Amino acid sequence: MSLIVFENVSKWYVDGKTRIQAVDNFNLSIEKGEFVCIVGASGCGKSTLLNMVAGFIKPSSGRILLNGEPITGIDPRCGMIFQNYALFPWKTVLGNVEFGLKMKGVPKKERQKVAREYISMVGLSGFENSYPSELSGGMKQRVTIARALANDPEILLMDEPFAALDAMTRQVMQEELLRIVDESNKTTLFITHSIDEALLLADRVIIMSARPGRVKQDLTIDLPRPRHVSDQLSERYLELKNTIWSSVEEEVLHNMLITYGENNRQPKRKLA
Amino acid sequence: MSVDIESARLTTDVPAAEAEMPTENADLLSKLRRYRNLLISIFSVVTFISVWELVGRLGLVSPVFLPSPSLIYREGVMLFQNGVIQTDILASTRRVLVGFGISAAVAVPLGLLMGTSETLKAIFDPILSIIRPLPALSWIPLSMLWLGIGESQKYAIVFMGAFAPTLVYVIDATRRVDPLVIKAAKNLGASRLAVLREVILPGAMPNIISGLKVVLAVAWTCIISAEMVGASNGLGYRIWSAKDWGNTPQVLLGMVGISLTVLVIDTIFKKVEEKLIPWERNRR
Ligand SMILES: Nc1ncnc2c1ncn2[C@@H]1O[C@H](COP(=O)(O)OP(=O)(O)O)[C@@H](O)[C@H]1O
Ligand SMILES: [Mg+2]
């Protein structure tokens, strides 16, 4: 049985009198242990999809199954990693990472032991008692990952988690994530608008159509593992990158036309 | 390539605190600057008091109108020796702290609930909007009718002065808690109660505390006024009765007493603040 199944999922937002369809009839199955990347033009409904898996919002129609059962509310089995970290500023690194276990009622000693293991896994040993405001962006994202992992979710949901980091740190974090996901053997649903990031990380890349989002293409990435940034020069890599790019490009252009159409009262400003 | 990445981690992930560690030299410089500023401050105070004293000594202003610092000091020594001033300071401080404490103990939990529950907000909002515009002093007559001029009336005045503003500050602080962080907590399995205790309370704490600081000043205004109207001790009573006796040095002494007491309490409050919100330690 697939771990996650999207069954004809659609979502529309009602904003005053206008109705925006964000996701349209989305179908996808994710197997246990897979690393799936979703790429797509901005505004095509990627975050909406992820928020529905986490249970923050409900599909307007269709359903999402986790282990065969529909997701009905916010579900700790789907661990979310936010782009803006969403760490608790008043808790230390240790306090943040042990939070999920504390909510489960795990005794203090035990949960701190587990938390320390994950802190060490993300390379932050020695920073247990630091507050988030004392950490750099890359370190904060490590804490978020450790916090999600310590709660032992069935799937990690990551919404452009490294987009706020500088290019150097981003590369380090991508390689770290590969190692961590490998070590913890977690299923991961990862959203990005970077094709390189998707090719470095994913077993499968899902290309979404312009809004309303649908699965446009489902590509298996057969690049050998372990992967490194240096693999970006291999022939197969460039081939895959080309395939994805031409597919995405169509949608980006389409997307610009949608945006143009919706804002045709001030077309110049929108196109600039 | 992987070597590059290792070094990239070292350079990009240095914690902010370490990067800003001051060198010994910079330390010395900042110490010197602090001494210099302290000296300037002392000089300014000494000058101010000397000019004031001189004005009195030269007979430029009558001591009944504005007594010189030495007269106030003499009055202070006298009141200190017979223990009057200590009693007054303690009486006023206790009234402020009790009234303020009770108000905070009720308003903080109520504000947290009102900030997070639409229903509770709907229930209490009308009451709050009627009480809120009333100055605390307008409660003095009613409170004297109900409670006389004893201690409970003083506590009540401070409570009435502090309660509504505290509630407003707490509700506001609660609503400013980052919704993303609340989402994260729920995603990690937090129940409604856990969200309130583990996220909303600490998240609102910095704003609650800065609100409480403002309210503490309001509480002092309340108690001084209440003591002027009806009391047998306290700094407000001291000032008012000194005026009736034409004892201007004592009026000024009482005012200095208020000033110093509030300063001391503010300092203590700051220490408490550091204990309550340690995570803000490098933002101050
Ligand atoms: N809460 C909302 N209310 C109204 N429209 C929304 C809301 N959230 C997202 N949208 C719209 O739905 C579309 C998809 O948004 P989103 O899922 O955030 O896209 P992506 O993450 O791919 O950039 C966008 O056009 C966006 O403006
Ligand atoms: Mg998004």
Image (cartoon, coloured by chain):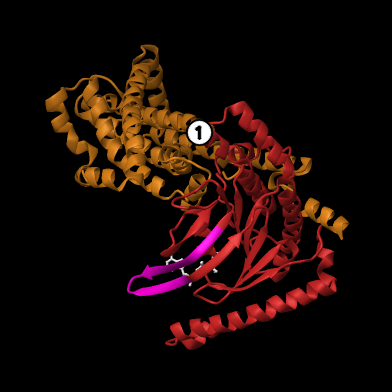
Chain colours: A red, B orange
Q: Is residue B166 visible?
A: no
Residue at 69% over, 78% down = A245
Residue A144 in percent (x, y) is at 62, 48
Residue found at x 86% / y 57%: B2
**Left or right of B247: which side holds A15?**
right
Q: Secondary structure at mark 1?
A: helix
The answer to whether residue A147 is left or right of residue B127 is right
* Nearer to the camera, B153 or A22: A22
Of residues B268 and A190, which is closer to you in this image?
A190
Residue at image position (68%, 81%) is A246
Closer to us: B133 or A155: A155
Q: Residues within 10 Å of mark 1 (few under 14, many from 20)?
A: some
Relative height, residue A245 to residue A66 (above, below): below
- A65 w.r.t. A236: above or below: above
Quadrant in the picture for the N terminus of chain A: bottom right
- The amino acid pointed to by label 1 is Leu
Q: Which residue is mark 1?
A: B276
The C terminus of chain A is located in which quarter?
bottom right
From the top left corner, tell me how far across and down residue B274 is, in percent: 53, 34
The magenta segment is A5-23
Say which quarter of the image contains residue B158: top left
Residue located farthest toward the left when viewing the structure as drawn: B145
Residue in the image at 55% along x and 59% along y:
A5
| Left or right: B22 in relation to A25 | right
Asked whether residue B59 is in view, the answer is yes
Compare residues B282 and A158 and report the one nearer the observer: A158
Q: Chain of mark 1?
A: B
Is residue A167 shown above or below B182? Answer: below
